[in-house]
Each structure stands twice: as structure tokens, then as C-alpha cells.
Image (tube, rainbow, N blue to C red):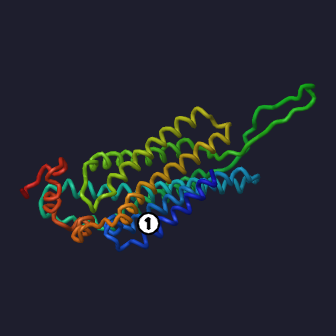
Amino acid sequence: MSSVAAVGLLSAFGFLYINYHYRYHSIIRQSSPRLNNVIVIGCMLSYCCVFVYGAEAFVESLDTHSVICKIRWWMFSLAFTLAFGTMFVKTWRVYKIFTNKQLYKQLGSLHDRHLFGIVCGLVCLDVAYLTAWEITDPITSSHRHLSKDISPDGHDSTQGYFIICTSDNENLWSTFWAIWKSLLLVIGLFLAWETRHVSFPSLNDSKYIGMSVYNVVIMILITVSLSFVVGTNHIQAKYALYTTAFNVISTFTLLLLFVPKIAKIKGGTTYPEQTPDVVNGTTPFNSFCCEQRRHHECPHCKCK
């Protein structure tokens, strides 16, 4: 799994380069390249979680293991927020624009800087929650012993053990954390569903963002369900399960976000120059109506 994560990490650097190199191309520029960078960074952190999980197998010290456990929680939480929180706010901007019922209404609060502010707010919530967890109920490591294996003659016995991460109220903290992230996923699913018919060229990635959200939900449901079946004593199986989820989610997200753009760039596709203001929410909604008269997402169009 680490080799897969390494390839994914290198691919993420490649997508960062492409996003920077073509940042002035209409296809990349109108999809908010700076926000795309944040999504890629979140996916890179997710890949790094695979290495952190793998490092636990080589650690014998309980103190060192507890540090790795804390790093794992922080990296996973921030990776989720940076990658999918950013995708959600991009989809939210599409939703706000296409549900604007007042023609020529200026939606200035939808500039990239405002979306960055929302993402920073989500990150601050993560930091505050994890800090409170660390202060009030710090994560520690402990040994969990397996059942004894007795030799056939009955004179010798061996008992293996593995190291686990735990805290006094770990179930409570992790449950509230899961509820918080699930709420984000529910909001993301709602926004993806509401913007499923949007086909305005400058907002071309809204469909792929929705597909990424669906992929995340499906993978999380599969991972959580199988983790209950596997149990806590099968460390290698849980490692394979979690790292597979990290790799699949991150890889699908990057591919869905960038491959369609790269294909259009290589195919010579460009978008009209008036649409950059559209993605910032400053173009009159009337222009959307003119483009979308054939679609159901423009029920209040008056530009016929």
C-alpha cells in the first residue's frame, strides 16, 4: 500500500505542476486554481496517512507510538477538511449562483478569498477540536495481548501482543468527530445533488466534484462496515482496509478533478473570456439564464 501511496503522491505533485503551469488557461483559471491547490494538498496529506499507518509496525516504544497516533489523527482530519471541505465550498458557490432568483444580483461574497475564509474556518474547527481532545483526554499507546499459544507438550507457551492507540473517552471523542465529518458529507451530497444538472462551461468541474463526494461516501460506508467485521485484533487486515480507502479516495478525487481538464486542454478546448467573473459570482445571473434556458436549473429565467 505504501508503494501505491508513493505513486499517488508523485502524481499529486504532477497535478500541482499542471495546475500552476496552465493557471492562465481558461479551463484551469475558471475552475479556481488556488482552490484546486488546496484540494491537492489535502489529497497529499491523505496519501501521507498511509505512511504513518505503516510506520506503526516498526515502532516498539509506547511514547513514540502515541506520537504517531496523534499525528495520524491530525493528518487525517486536516486532509479531509482541506480536500473535501474545499470541494464542498466550490460546489456551494455553484449552488448559490444557480439559485439566485434575483436577476443582476451581485454575489460578491463568492470570490475565492471568501471561499478560502470558509475553508480556514473549517480547519480552525478541526484544530480546536483536536486540541481540546489532546488537552483534556490525550491519546496514549498501550499493549494488547493476544491469546496464549501452548506447545504440544504443554511445557512452553507464547503470547503475542500489539500496540493500540487509546484514551479514556476515545469512543466519545471519535464519535463526535465522525458526526462532524458526516455532517460535512451530508451537506456535500446535498450540494452535489442540487447542482447535478449544471452544465455551464466555466463551472465544468461541479459534476466531477459531485462524483468525488459519492465516491467518498461509498468508500467510507464500505470501510466502516468491514472494520466491524474484521475486529480490533486483526491489525494487518485493518491496515490494508484503511490504507486502501485512503488510496482509492485520494486517487479518484485527483483523477476526477484534473483528468477532464487535462483532456480538454490537450484537445484545444477553451472557454469564453467573460466567464471568469461568473465563477466569482459577479456576473449578472441573467447571463446564466441565457445559457441555461434549455435546462431545468433555470426556472426563473426572464431573458427569453
Residue under the point 18% across and 49% down: 295
- The residue sitting at the front extreme is 267
- Residue 201 is left or right of residue 241, and the answer is left
Residue under the point 42% across and 68% down: 19
Question: From the viewer's perspective, is residue 101 above or below residue 232?
Answer: below
Question: From the viewer's perspective, is residue 219 above or below residue 102?
Answer: above
Quadrant of the image occupied by residue 39? bottom left
Residue placed most toward the observer, 105 or 94: 94
Asked if one can make out residue 74 in the rendered structure from this viewpoint, the answer is no
Spot occupied by residue 293 in the image (x, y as percentages of width and height)? 14, 53
Question: From the viewer's perspective, is residue 75 above or below residue 33?
Answer: above
The C terminus appears in which quarter of the rendering? bottom left
Quadrant of the image occupied by residue 111? bottom left
Asked if one can make out residue 121 in the rendered structure from this viewpoint, the answer is yes
Amino acid bearing label 1: Asn
**Label 1's element?**
helix
Residue placed most toward the observer, 189 or 148: 189
Residue placed most toward the observer, 253 or 181: 253
Question: From the viewer's perspective, is residue 87 above or below residue 14?
Answer: above
Residue under the point 65% across and 47% down: 165
Residue under the point 38% across and 68% down: 33
- List the residue tagged with mark 1: 37
Spot occupied by residue 63 in the image (x, y as percentages of width and height)? 72, 55
Spot occupied by residue 69 in the image (x, y as percentages of width and height)? 63, 52
